[in-house]
Amino acid sequence: MKTLLSHVFVTIAVVVAAFVLYEHLIARPARRVGVVDVADVYRAKEAEFSRRITSATSDEERRLALEMARVFSRRLPAALAELPRECGCLVVLKSAIAGAPASLDLTPALRRKVDAP
């Protein structure tokens, strides 16, 4: 009888441990949603580019403004691709979500990635 009870308790402990691991490693990360406001980041860079290009007084300043725009156009897709791996969550556009209270705003992280030298 004692052997049977010990087997039952071991089985219950293993099942509980499996459920807890599943919840923490698979189910909970799949439910996390990160949102990013790409339009806001793009508008800010566009305003910075417009300001630089209109205030440029030399060809060198214009060239630097155009180079900044080229670098941004290369970094934005790469930064967007890195976000899901870093947060371990699904990343969607902020404009595509309506009322997700448990969502994680990743817009500041995207700004840092795009502005990093």
Image: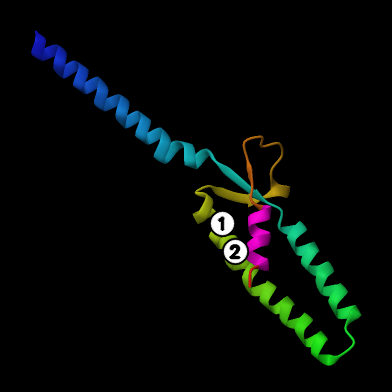
Residue underneath mark 1? 83
Residue underneath mark 2? 79
**Image-based side of 6 in relation to 66, left or right:** left
Q: Are marks 1 and 2 in contact (CB under 8 Å)?
A: yes
- Mark 1: few/some/many CA within 10 Å (<14, 14-19, 20+): many
How far across and down, in percent of the image, does residue 65 sit?
A: 78, 80
How far across and down, in percent of the image, does residue 28 sit?
A: 47, 37
In terms of image quadrants, where is residue 74?
bottom right
Residue at the top extreme, as displayed: 1
Look at the image and say whether residue 109 sits in the magenta stretch: yes
**Image-based side of 7 in relation to 73, left or right:** left
Quarter of the rendering occupied by the N terminus: top left
Q: Residue at x 41, y 40 (%)?
A: 26
Q: Which residues are magenta?
A: 107-115
Q: Secondary structure at mark 1?
A: helix
Q: Residue at x 70, y 48 (%)?
A: 94
**Residue type indicated by callout 2:** Ala
Q: Residue at x 67, y 76 (%)?
A: 71
Q: What colour scheme governs how the chains and residues are painted in the rendered image of this protein?
A: rainbow
Overall secondary structure of the magenta stretch?
A: helix
> As displayed, is residue 16 above or below residue 59?
above
CA distance separating discs 1 and 2: 6 Å
Residue at the bottom extreme, as displayed: 59
Quarter of the rendering occupied by the C terminus: bottom right
**Residue type indicated by callout 1:** Leu
Q: Residue at x 90, y 79 (%)?
A: 54
Look at the image and say whether residue 96 sits in the magenta stretch: no
**Image-based side of 1 in relation to 97, left or right:** left
